[in-house]
Amino acid sequence: MLRSEVNTLLTQTGPRTPMGELFRQYWIPALLAEELPEDDCPPVRVKLLSERLIAFRDSQGRYGLIDEFCAHRGVSLWFGRNEQSGLRCAYHGWKYDVTGACLEIPSEPAGGTFHRRVKLTSYPMVKVGDVLWTHMGDSTRRPALPEFEFALVAPDQTFISKRWQECNWLQALEGGIDSSHVSWLHSGGLMSDPLFKGSKGNDYNLNDRKPFFEVADADGGLFIGARRNAENGEFYWRITPWIMPSFTMVPPRGGHPMHGHFWIPIDDHNCWTYSFDYHPVRALTASELQAMREGHGVHSANIPGMYRPLANRDNDYLMDRTAQRRGETFSGVKGIAMQDASLQESMGPIVDRTKEQLVTTDAGIIKTRHKLRNAAIALRDHGTVPPGIEPAHQRVRSAAVVVPCESSFFDSCHEALRAAPGMPPASV
């Protein structure tokens, strides 16, 4: 179990909180690029780390992420007109550029300089891959742009989606690094989901439901290994990388693409789940892309025009008890992504970790919490730069391998866990 004060430290991410300041050291996803598709398109409301912001793309194609509210009377700039290289407030016409600087106050005398003293909070926003990333921390400590492999491969080799998840970011992240639940919660999906089925690894997951866990340190976080029995005295290892603060990858299956997530706090009770698929050496096929868009694999089917899943807490995730009895789904919820989200959200907005009874298969979760806590305190008390910021820390992969029983998973898979352009993934 976790002490209440540590649970609070890990789950609160607003301004001036230790974990909030930790997140502000990194480039984090703010939007999908598709949300600002062209110059002067409508602005988008953004809430990140409990801050209410507005995002827009100006007449010159520059991206802006600024305080949502006009400095004059506090009106939301979502109602504003995006025109002529700035966002103009709909109330009195005050106009702001992508840096938050006020360009015009129409009611003031011509030639006046008052507008030059008005500036909204702003954060940089840059496109890498199909994601618009922002850095919300000290501009003098801004790191290099992210170099996660899924964002750097050719456009036809990658796909990314997002969904709104109605719980704290940490319990969502912890689901992403927990390999033991796969043998239970996803037992039906392993055999039917078009982005998972047909791999030998599924047999190992379903035939050995008592995995042994081993956790190794990585430069940017952890490698979490889950071991199951294979044939001929060998072991099947699924290795999940976690890069601070909230990047995870799912071990691959057969010839399917690789996939993973970012878990980004909206506020303390909600987060964005960014889910990606990519293949490092080939284009995604038409059937794979169709399956991803339909909500298979790590993706969700969302309400049209929104990023809220069709299956959500308001409709009990469209649970089908008949399908559950037939064994089509273990929990009655359809889809790998929503099977995870439904149970993570069922814990409540922030799970009370003082009531937990953890076991050996929770080794990765326990060590992740320790690393997060130590990094947040070191940053707060000493200004120590946390792991995971350096691009070299981000060049990782997940892996699924069968190795002799006497072999260490980390020694056997060391090269497979490193992102290497042009090299296929280690997958079973």
Image (cartoon, grey):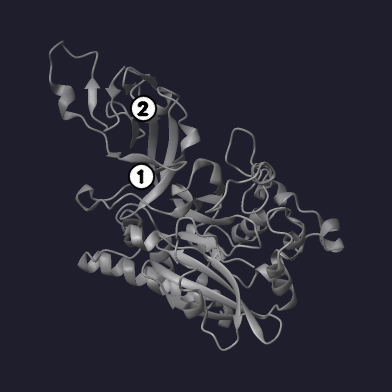
* Residue visible at 69% across and 72% down in the picture: 205
Q: Quadrant of residue 46?
A: top left
The answer to which of 349 and 194 lies nearer the viewer is: 194
The residue where tag 1 is placed is 134
Task: Identify whether 152 is placed above or below 351.
Answer: above
The residue where tag 2 is placed is 61
* Residue visible at 31% across and 28% down in the picture: 70
Q: Earlier in the sequence, mark 2 or mark 1?
A: 2
Task: Identify whether 253 is placed above or below 283.
Answer: below
Looking at the image, the residue that sits furthest to the front is 422
Task: Identify whether 268 is placed above or below 351.
Answer: above
Q: Quadrant of residue 213?
A: bottom right
Residue 95 appears at what percent x and percent y? 29, 21
Q: Quadrant of residue 389?
A: bottom left
- Packing grade of label 2 (10 A; few <14, some 14-19, many >=20) is some
Q: Secondary structure at mark 2?
A: loop
The answer to which of 301 and 279 lies nearer the viewer is: 279
Residue 3 seen anywhere in this rendered image of the structure:
no
Instruction: Give the amino acid type for the residue marked by disc 1 in the picture.
Output: Thr
Q: Secondary structure at mark 1?
A: strand
Residue 156 seen anywhere in this rendered image of the structure:
yes
The answer to which of 181 and 279 lies nearer the viewer is: 279
* Residue visible at 38% across and 72% down in the picture: 371
Instruction: Give the Cα separation between the discs numbered 2 and 1.
Output: 16 Å
Q: Are dots 2 and 1 in contact, CB under 8 Å?
A: no
